[in-house]
Amino acid sequence: MSYNEAKDKYASIGIDAEAAIAALAKVPVSLHCWQGDDVGGFDRKAALSGGIQTTGNHPGKARTPEELMADIDKVLALCPGTKKINIHACYAIFENGEWADRDQIEPRHFARWVKFCKERGLGADFNPTFFGHPKCDPLTLASPNEDTRRFWVEHGRRCIRIAQYLAEELGQPCVMNIWAGDGLKDIPGDRLGPRLRYRKSFDEIISEPFDKSKVYVTVEAKLFGIGVESYTVGSSEFCLKYAAENKDRGVISLMDSGHYHPTEVISDKISSLLVYDKNIALHVSRPVRWDSDHVVLFDDETREIAREIVRCDALDRVFIALDYFDASINRIAAWTTGFRNMQKALLYALLQPCAGLKAMQDSQDFTRLLVAQEELKTMPFGEVWAEYCRRQGAPLDGEWLDGVVAYERDVLLKRR
Ligand code: RNT
Ligand code: ZN
């Protein structure tokens, strides 16, 4: 079947494939820089902490800014759509023998990222890094040790300045996400104290002045992490309440698809937050039994997340970022697969007869609703996806992996 035939097939059920392609091309999706080096960063050699872990030791991970940027370029060339680069503070780039600790970093340590983004016309998002550092005691923003807590608050405040710098330089808003893995391995003796300190620290961070039209501060909730199984300070309730209470100061909720109980899905939560909030943010990931950050698939939940965003007519209200890190396979293929799958899910969602499905529900025609949704699954989606890739100058499915394998042979395997 050709694209034109597929287009006609969609038109026969009231769907405009051209409009779907045009709409998707404008939706920014944030590509996380940390898939390229297993969340390593450039500012120190400390092991990952905060309950997150990469597993696998596939050869060829990026070791320097040059290598990471070269790898990102590969991914960008293989992915259709509008991209932003999501940078963590630990990816500061120090030059001429300089080094600055997390409570000393400055916008200029991200000048190379600005250059990288400018040359490619990309926006950027940003994240303070509250993990992988000796000052995780193990708590950071919730630490009872005032010296530790202040160190991390200062880090957060500096990150707001860096986020604003990125937004101003690149002429696009910057989402600055606060996630700290603060929590305890075993049963706490005090659950309230750390949460009160966490709130105080958040308040101190956002008291750093910023332009709310340029910097969107998000707070990411979590259930638990490896090594912090019994208690997480920044739980879902905590972060939702914090964002609600500080909405006017520019704080937005962020939901990561791996940060809830195993049968809980964020697709069902999106509409609840959109009832109350102008903007929300997402980390699209894939948890396998825990927050394992597997590569995002074109699976039911990723599709449902995208369908919800589209059905709520909220493509311009939801900040979509990817968050996964697989070190067991070729990292460029992992990155590319997840990004392309997010694009596929969004395109698939844009090819839904939303108004028709709503009408079936509202007229209690649940039989027709079920059948219609099932039959959508075998519509010729692949042809529309291929056309979208062609128009974006991106390779089609089946056309990109051999190039990645060649890059692995010629470049990645020489990184030893
Ligand atoms: C951890 C959170 C967080 C991190 C990144 C690296 O569970 O999902 O978003 O993955 O900041
Ligand atoms: Zn996340």
Image (cartoon, rainbow, N blue to C red):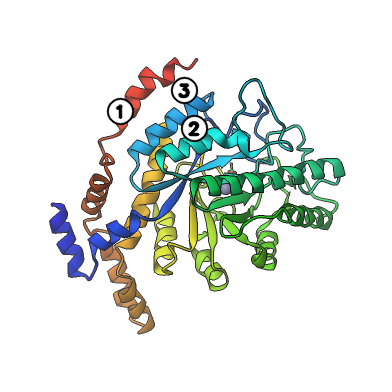
Q: Is residue 261 visible?
A: no
Give the x, y percent position of residue 149: 80, 45
> Going from the N terminus, do you reach mark 3 or mark 2 first?
2
Q: In terms of secondary structure, where does tag 2 sit?
A: loop
Residue 335 is drawn in which quadrant? Answer: top left
- The residue lying at 64 percent from left, 52 percent from top is 222
Distance CA(mark 3)–CA(mark 1): 15 Å
Q: Is residue 370 visible?
A: yes
Per the rendering, the mark at residue 403 is 1
Is 317 above or below relative to 105? below
Distance CA(mark 1)–CA(mark 2): 17 Å
Q: Is residue 4 left or right of residue 75?
A: left
Give the x, y percent position of residue 125: 54, 47
Distance CA(mark 3)–CA(mark 2): 9 Å
Graded by Cα atoms within 10 Å as few (under 14), some (14 to 19) or many (20 or more), the crowding at tag 2 reads many
- The residue lying at 29 percent from left, 62 percent from top is 351
Residue type beneath disc 3 = Gly
Residue on which the image places disc 2: 36
Per the rendering, the mark at residue 320 is none
Q: Is residue 366 left or right of residue 85?
A: left
